[in-house]
């Protein structure tokens, strides 16, 4: 029987550890997504530029407070509640189909994104100031206060459509492919193990980022506050100025972050779940 609270806490702990490790890649991805065409730089150049400005400290620490809080609101909820929602949709068992798993992942992704939009906005603003401008906020709390002062509390949910779309696509793609890959392996006699979890996690990381990348780009632009007021305006501007390629700007650092994160995150979550007596996903 699923234990939602314990599963959310176990998943959130795993996410806190991995997102702290890979926070530099999230910041670099945001930097590349927010740059104008004339400013565009490859990933190695982005690393060198940030390093010259502030060294390891500037690569690692921006938005870290928001990242820690986000761990529970995003991954904690979307992964932790996945078994419960999957069971409600009747998608458990060794012969269950991928569509029910995708629906469960998309549902938990939508819920987590709706709650976490303010945290995502704060983190994007902090990462964005490293990307292209002077330091306006010394901390995540300062950025949060500035957003509320300028746009009110409702402003914290600006760009919700892009955030929800991105999280639904990522969560549905990742969890469904991870779950289905494990199911297929078990049907061929492969036992639950860290090696199996890592192999399935690597596959799901690539699939998830391919699915969510266009929404990821639009989300970063909207939440940064510097690319128009609405999701539709950002979509139109990106398509007109950059074409289809614009929706995959920053794909290399996104995949460079997403795949290692999920590769470490899912086996870690599975290990924490097992230690807590929750069983495997």
Image: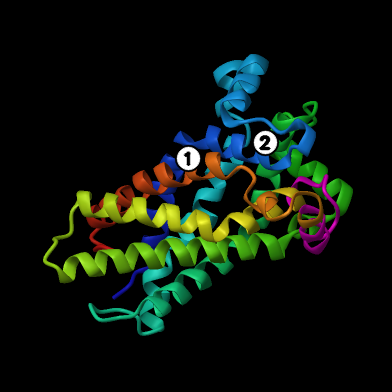
- Residue shown at 35%/62% (left/top)? 178
Q: Which residue corresponds to mark 1?
A: 256
**Residue 125 sits in which quadrant?**
top right
Mark identifier at residue 125 = none
72 part of magenta stretch: no
* Magenta-colored span: 223-238
231 part of magenta stretch: yes
Q: Quadrant of the N terminus?
A: bottom left
Q: Quadrant of the C terminus?
A: bottom left
Which one is in front, 133 or 253?
Answer: 253
- Residue shown at 18%/67% (left/top)? 186
Which one is in front, 106 or 72?
Answer: 106
Image position, residue 266 (x, y; %): 35, 52
Mark identifier at residue 31 = 2
Could you tell which of marks 1 and 2 lies nearer the N-terminus? Answer: 2
Farthest residue to the right: give it.
150
Q: Does residue 150 sit above or below 215 in this rendering? A: above
Left or right? Give the position of 189 relative to 110.
left
Image position, residue 7 (x, y; %): 37, 62
Image position, residue 3 (x, y; %): 34, 69
Q: Main secondary structure of the magenta part?
A: helix
| Residue 114 appears in the picture as rendered | no
């Amino acid at each position: 029987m699923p234990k939602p609270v314990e599963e959310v806490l176990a998943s959130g702990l795993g996410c806190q550890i991995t997102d702290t490790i890979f926070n530099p890649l999230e910041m670099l991805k945001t930097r590349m997504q927010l740059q104008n065409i004339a400013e565009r730089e490859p990933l190695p150049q982005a690393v060198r530029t940030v390093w010259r400005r502030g060294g390891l400290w500037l690569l690692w620490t921006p938005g870290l407070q928001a990242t820690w809080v986000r761990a529970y609101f995003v991954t904690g909820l979307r992964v932790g509640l996945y078994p419960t929602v999957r069971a409600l949709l009747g998608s458990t068992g060794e012969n269950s189909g991928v569509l029910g798993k995708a629906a469960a992942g998309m549902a938990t992704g939508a819920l987590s994104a709706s709650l976490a939009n303010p945290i995502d906005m704060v983190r994007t603003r902090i990462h964005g100031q490293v990307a292209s401008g002077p330091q306006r906020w010394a901390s995540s709390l300062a950025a949060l206060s500035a957003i509320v002062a300028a746009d009110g509390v409702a402003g914290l949910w600006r760009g919700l459509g892009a955030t929800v779309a991105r999280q639904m696509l990522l969560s549905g793609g990742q969890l469904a492919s991870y779950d289905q890959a494990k199911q297929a392996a078990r049907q061929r006699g492969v036992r639950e193990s860290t090696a199996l979890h890592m192999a399935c996690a690597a596959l799901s990381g690539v699939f998830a980022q391919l699915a969510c990348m266009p929404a990821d780009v639009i989300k970063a632009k909207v939440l940064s506050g510097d690319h128009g007021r609405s999701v539709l305006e950002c979509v139109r501007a990106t398509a007109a100025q950059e074409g289809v390629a614009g929706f995959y700007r920053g794909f290399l650092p996104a995949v460079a972050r997403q795949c290692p994160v999920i590769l470490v995150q899912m086996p870690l979550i599975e290990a924490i779940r097992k230690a807590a007596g929750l069983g495997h996903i």
